[in-house]
Image (cartoon, rainbow, N blue to C red):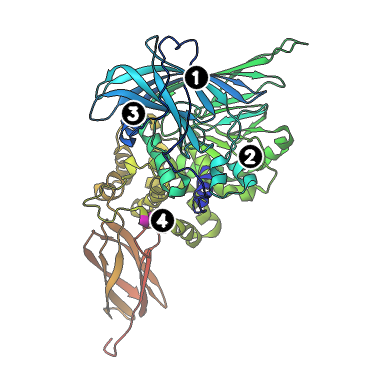
Amino acid sequence: MQGFVAAMFLLALTVAPVASGQAQQGSVIANSAAQTSSENKAGATTPETKFEVADATRRAILFTKYGLDVRLETRDATMHARAIVTVKNESAAPLDAIPLQISSSFAWEAINAEGKALRFVHHMVATDADHTGAMNEALVTLPAPLAVGSEQTLTVFYSGSAAPNAKRLEAIGTPPDVAIHADWDGIREEFTGLRGFGNVLWYPVCDVPVALGDGDRFFSAIGMTKLRESAASVSITVTEEFAGGAPTVAYLDGVTVPVEVTPAPEGSDVPGIATAKLKETKLGFATPTLFLARRAPESGNNLKLYARQSDAAATQSYMTAASILSSQMTDWFGAKVKRELNVLDPAEAEDSPFEDRALLVTNIANVDPKKLLGPMSHVLTHAYFPSPRPWLGEGVAQFMASVWTEHQQGREAAITQMDNQRGALSLAEPADPNHDAGQPLVRAHDPIFYRTKAAYVFWMLRGIVGDKPLMAALEQYDAAADQSSDYFQHLLEQTSGQKLDWFFNDWVERDRGLPDLNIQAVTPSQGSGEDSYIVAVTVANSGTAVADVPVTVSSADATVTAEMRIEAGGRATHRFLVHGRPTQVQANDGTTPETEASVHRKDIAYTPAQ
């Protein structure tokens, strides 16, 4: 939830007017001669002052392996890096040269292949994928054309400043004091945080320039990059030179790793050295991230908290919130937690939160634990239910946050909370699913799908199979065994005893858009018993996805509810036996999203004959 809050915060900023004089995204905003190091002087030539890179070329490059080795100097917030990266040509033609991009605050030093220096030119290109609002793009001439489907390994050297920078947000009118706490990435004495593509390009990437002013396209572009590179492998080695106290905790790619410290000799000006290493692992639906901090550790209730010394007492608020939520977590996922949730204090209390799987970077404050329960129910889910699939990992977490709202404030409040995002989902869905594939959940890269739509899917499944079968499937879920897109479907079919192809085909495996229901006809008649009535209700679906919704007939004495399945473009009729004269019919209770309103009511009018 906290990562979602941060994302929504940035999304809100995109509606601000673009300041006059802002560079057009994708345009060259500066050119300079390549600064070559001793490793590539023999092979480098003076770069051209201008060059063009087609977006199709940028989209052709896929990173399949990252080997990142960086040295941080906290005294002047600088970084020196060597990146060994493997890239693949996914275009339809061989490539003679490939583009690589880093933050505009970094300078290229050398680019080698198989021990030989490669020629490259570079320029600055406007993009909001980096907090500076620009990237330093190099065009690297390859030793031989890179064939279609082939891979090339490059060794890249670069260095520069990695201090907090809010230029991109200030350029769209964000107040500086707000912007700097959203774009807090940088190297500091007590806290280094580098979040990756979409925040700061601290490692080489290759992507089309993006702009915050393009609305949700910015977040969709980040998601697409994460999805494309989810199968890539990553290893990271970080060496930090520190003058004060040594860092005590490190998170690389969202994983906590040990910190080895060599203190500075007493009385010497030589800095101390701290080293942290992440062995080669699968990147997953994420960007490579780097956090190194001096924090006080506390643990309990399946939490590890690393607080600024002044916040150490505040960790109890989070532990209490986790304790309150434990019964909900164990009900839905079983007693065994898959991994601990890690909470890390950012550099400053005002810094916006960030979520990276089971790592939450957020201000640890002494607040009423009840105020933490909503967001904590989301992030704690990642500890109980890790999944490599975004629609499962994020969708279940979002679902659990709404279930907690239901528990605390009632079902109506939970449905209202979801309905606040339904309009955005409706706009994002394809207008014609027969000609536009949209974003099936199994391949979704936009948060409106893998969070919002996925949460709706679990509410609908809850209504179809019931709580206990859904709980059993979530508890039995094994991320390591999830090797096919229909793994969870089959798991739920086993626990529920129901065939669910009809639902998963429209809502998960394909993007069939949304249903659009209406109560087409209501026909009441006197039943055989005293004061009993039979009500025939016909519900039509003019939308493009199947709907299975609760339909309720109410009288002054009773309510009767039944699930009705209405195929896309079809209609269905159900006869209800009701005690007392029926007064109203309701179709859908808001748990199934529709293109328009998701609750339909119709009063039952009587003729004298009735």
Q: Residues within 10 Å of mark 2 (few under 14, many from 20)?
A: many
Q: Are marks 4 and 1 in contact (CB under 8 Å)?
A: no
Closer to the N terminus: mark 3 or mark 1?
Answer: 1
Closer to the N terminus: mark 1 or mark 2?
Answer: 1
Task: Residue 220: give x, y in percent of width and height.
Answer: 40, 43
What whole-number distance in Å separates the C-alpha atoms at marks 2 and 3? Answer: 44 Å
Task: Residue 71: give x, y in percent of width and height.
Answer: 57, 18
Question: Callout 1: helix, strand or loop?
Answer: loop
Going by the numbered disc 4, the residue's amino acid type is Ala
Q: Residues within 10 Å of mark 3 (few under 14, many from 20)?
A: many
Among the 4 quarters of the image, the one containing residue 521 = bottom left
Q: Which residue is mark 4?
A: 424
Closer to the N terminus: mark 2 or mark 3?
Answer: 3
Q: Which residue is mark 1?
A: 35
Tell me the number on the disc at residue 319.
2
Among the 4 quarters of the image, the one containing residue 396 = top left
Closer to the N terminus: mark 4 or mark 1?
Answer: 1
What whole-number distance in Å separates the C-alpha atoms at marks 4 and 1? Answer: 46 Å
Question: Callout 4: helix, strand or loop?
Answer: helix
